Amino acid sequence: MAIRAYVHFDLLRYFGDNLAINSNTLGVPYKREFNLENIARPTVADTWQAIFADLNEAKTLLADTDITINGSNNFSLRASIDPITVDAILARAYLYSGQYPQAITAATQVINQVPLASRANFPAIWRDENIGRSELIWSIPFNSGEGTPAANVYFASGNRSSFRPSTEVLSQFDQVNDIRFSTYFRTVSNRTIVAKYLGKGNLSDGIVNWKAIRVSEMYLIRAEANTRVSGGGINALNDLNTLRAARITGYVPVVLTGTALEDAIELERRKELFVEGHRFFDVKRTTRNLVRSDCGTNFTTCSLLPGNRAWAWPIPIGEIIANDLINEGDQNPGFN
């Protein structure tokens, strides 16, 4: 149920136009049974209802098991979904759907059980080394022959990379004191490449576990949600400063309020969750402008503004042909 909710949530992020909890725009068909029956596109509100129903029932069922799930103290081996994982997925889904008090509660449940990694241990997360009971909430194992999370990020020999990190985002890091900079990036032959998924231990084969959810995201979820509720600013600031202090040597806490605080949290998500699959959706759900400042000369389009049809992917024509309950009128806006 938890996995079913998780993958339908992912589909909704891509194909939903308006992700608000009560949105009457079209969502994604929610498949509950293994059969050949077609399902019409429900509303986003109906899709959310199914997602939260599955997650809450999964949490109840996973709390009553005969053996401990993820019983090892090695959090790099947290490959199974347990109640902590479900709370983390709930926190993410509550944030996306605009249910901010619930997002705060769910994120707090996780934060109270999983500590942030120390600066000394942080690089070991990305090499799948045993750092004890910290940071990771759900890590999906990859072994030789099973593919790699590094696909389209880094090619294992030499300094080949399928994209270069934006100079804008590189400039946002304290490149000397922020442990994330030396962990996420590497300079090879005067080129800065992404080194986040190089491999296990000292290997550089691109075969490494996928860190699906980390506790740092929970701090950022709780911080953002607190900026959306009355009187939550101080709590949001505390979470922002706590995360930064865990990553940056000699960090001096800041005092921010209002828009400045919201922008700082958004920037911290961009830095902390770099190439973990969040940036596009963060800009989408907050209706910000997506602008590449160092786009170069090879591209004609370097921005994506709110309202552009590209924020919600088109329903594939094969799906429309195969599913007699989805017609051309159910296509996403701008693709008819």
Image (spheres, rainbow, N blue to C red):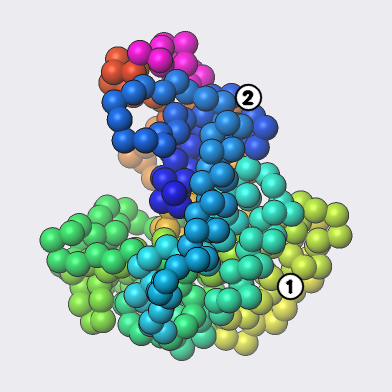
Left or right of residue 295, residue 287 in this image? right
Residue 311: in magenta span: no
Disc 1 marks a residue whose amino acid type is Asn
**Which residue is painted at 60% across and 56% down in the image?**
91
Q: Which amino acid lies under the numbered mark 2 shown in the image of this protein?
A: Asn
Q: How many marks?
A: 2
For label 1, count other residues whose C-alpha is less than 10 Å away and answer few (under 14), some (14-19) or many (20+). some
| Location of residue 17 in the rendering, given as x and y in whole percent from the top left corner | 55, 29
Q: Looking at the image, which is closer to me, 190 or 198?
A: 198
110 or 222, which lies in front?
A: 110
**Label 2, residues with CA under 10 Å away: few <14, some 14-19, many ≥20:** some
Q: Which residue is mark 2?
A: 24
Q: Is residue 51 left or right of residue 212?
A: right
Indicate the position of residue 329 as horizontal and vertical percent values.
47, 11
Q: Secondary structure at mark 2?
A: loop
Q: Which mark is residue 255?
A: none
For disc 1, the marked residue is 238
The residues colored magenta run 324-336
In this view of the protein, can residue 314 be seen by the observer?
yes
- Is 165 situated above or below 77? above
Query: Which of labels 1 and 2 is toward the front?
Result: 2
Q: Where does the C terminus fall, quadrant-wise?
A: top left
